[in-house]
Image (cartoon, grey):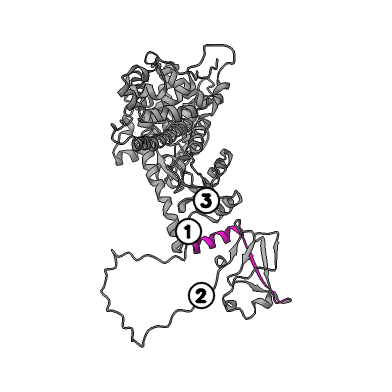
Amino acid sequence: MFRPSNPQVSLLESRFLVPPEKQARLARSWAHVFLTRVMPLIGEECMRDCFDPGNGRPNKSIRLLMGVHLLKAWNDLTDEQVLENLEYNLQWQYALGIQADEAHLPQKTLHNFRARLLESGQGMAMFDGIARGLAELDGLSWSRQRLDSTHVMSDIAVLTRLGLFVETETLFLRELKAEYPEKVSSLGAAVVRRYLEREGYFADAKRDQAQRRLPVAAQDLLYLVRRFERDASVNGWESYRLMVRLLEEQCDVNGDAGEGGTGGEPSEKIALKNPKEIKGASLQSPHDPDATYGHKGKGYEVQVSETCVAENPYQIVTHVQINGAHESDQHATLPVVMRLAEKGMVPEELEADTGYGSGENIVACAVEGVRLVAPVQDPDAPTKVEHRWEPAVEQPAADPSAQNQEPPAEPGPLGLGDFRFDATFDEAVACPAGHAPVRQEVLDGSVPYKATFDGERCRGCPLEGRCPTRVVAKTGDRVLNWRDVTAATATRQLEQREPAFKEAYKIRSGVESTMEEFKGRHGGRDLRVRRRPQVELAAIFKTAAMNAKRAAQYHVERLQEALAGEPEASPVTG
């Protein structure tokens, strides 16, 4: 049964049971900020539907459980460490607003709370309530934000190709042995020996051995898949479906299905695919089927956006989401902007690196009212000289009076980027000479936008010979046809060469320290969970804890400034 937290303060809370000097220190510590500014922002109503409305025992305080998980993520603790701190850490009890005799939770309660968050999908609602609440309390602006991604690993081992085959088959056979030992007995002795009797040894091979063992593991995989594909008591297991997936992704099978030959060998012919043919979304571990492979390795990509407004007293993370390691940042840009819009925290300007920059993304963000400040690939950018390969040669000083100086190069032709367009690049504002078009149209076809410029004005223009517009024979007017994404790309390629763009873009680099904070201090580099929903919930907890920590640090500094000379507040510890 759902029961909201009791807002009444008890005189038996830990903070009232210590001497006045300790109370004063607690009131200047992170714990006081957490209690007074973070805990009230934890929404509970979003969890109401997770409980029976009128039956069962009342739930443990949602606010308390969420607060405990924030403190857990704050210092990257295990459940065991969390429960120990809850029992004996005075600052934790103060921060959570609980009495010393009630500072106890079973580990199952923590597990069940996470399970309910995963089932209901309300983890992000909890995050949003804290982020938006802190922004409103402390007057933080989200008009300018920066976006970046970082690679994380779930709690899996990095397997070789042979190791993947062996572990997937072993996982199935281990489950089969536990449920139907008689079916294991009916299998070939070699299969049982390779994957159960000396579990794991078959994958523990040197390079030359692995090349010989891999085809054997593939044959065993085909044999097991065919052996149980019509067995309804087994073929619904996830471990069996993972074998089928592995077979489809890693192997080519030809011939007649069924068992043939001696010793249960299949009559079908199986061949391993070339590694270059295997997609990044393929199975990487049977223990985490959601993990994929990208250029940064196996695992997931965490997308994080945060404020970067200079006037903010501190910056907060506004959104976090999980993508597959094989997914490009190009495809994450617009979904992040749309989610920020849903939250009512969409920025006016979004800073991102080249991985997010493209004409398509610039236009799509502009339609949502967001200026995407991200470089795009520029094929015309000057090539940097690699001095390691070309030793520097001292050149004589130039003689100003020299008569044999080369004349300056003739200016090249103008391009689409020299025109000025509106924010969404579907209307031309002015030509390179500053003249507005006399007429604009939207056409059917692959190049839909057309602007017509007055031919009389264009004649005699000093840029006429370099202008990319074409002349209309009948009227003498000049016409420009373009695609919005092409215009956006061309415009950005010119913008990003300018010192003003480079200076404004420097603020994006600050997100790198946020990523290091997430992966280092808060344990995001190697997570203790598996599967995409659990990884996303862990990222939500960790980024929400980052926001709470930043707020605490800011307000503790203000308290210390106001009470200069008093003992400093102790940091949060596990």
The answer to whether residue 224 is above or below residue 215 is above
What secondary structure is marked by label 2? loop
Q: Mark 3 packing: few (<14 Cα in 10 Å), some, or many (20+)?
A: some
* Residue 228 painted magenta: no
The answer to whether residue 440 is above or below residue 127 is below
Q: Amino acid at mark 3?
A: Glu
Q: Amino acid at mark 1?
A: Gln
Q: Mark 1 packing: few (<14 Cα in 10 Å), some, or many (20+)?
A: some
The disc placed on residue 412 is 2
Q: Earlier in the sequence, mark 1 or mark 2?
A: 1
What secondary structure is marked by label 1? loop
Q: Position of residue 35 (x, y in %)?
A: 42, 26
Q: For the residues marked 1 and 2, what is the alpha-carbon distance in whole angstroms?
A: 20 Å
The disc placed on residue 377 is 1
Q: For the residues marked 3 and 2, what is the alpha-carbon distance in whole angstroms?
A: 33 Å
Q: Amino acid at mark 2?
A: Gly
Quadrant holding the C terminus = top left
* Residue 492 painted magenta: yes
Q: In this picture, which residue range is highlighted in magenta?
A: 475-495
Q: Is residue 397 left or right of residue 333?
A: left
Task: Give the quarter of the image for residue 74.
Answer: top left
Work out which residue is located at the far right of the displayed protein and give it.
474
Quadrant holding the N terminus = top right
The answer to whether residue 347 is above or below residue 541 is below
Residue 377 visible, this orientation: yes
Q: Earlier in the sequence, mark 3 or mark 1?
A: 3
User: For mark 3, what is the residue?
Assistant: 349
Work out which residue is located at the far bottom of the displayed protein and give it.
403
Q: Position of residue 90 (x, y in %)?
A: 33, 21
Q: Position of residue 33 (x, y in %)?
A: 41, 30
Q: Nearer the viewer, residue 238 or 546?
A: 546
Residue 268 visible, this orientation: no
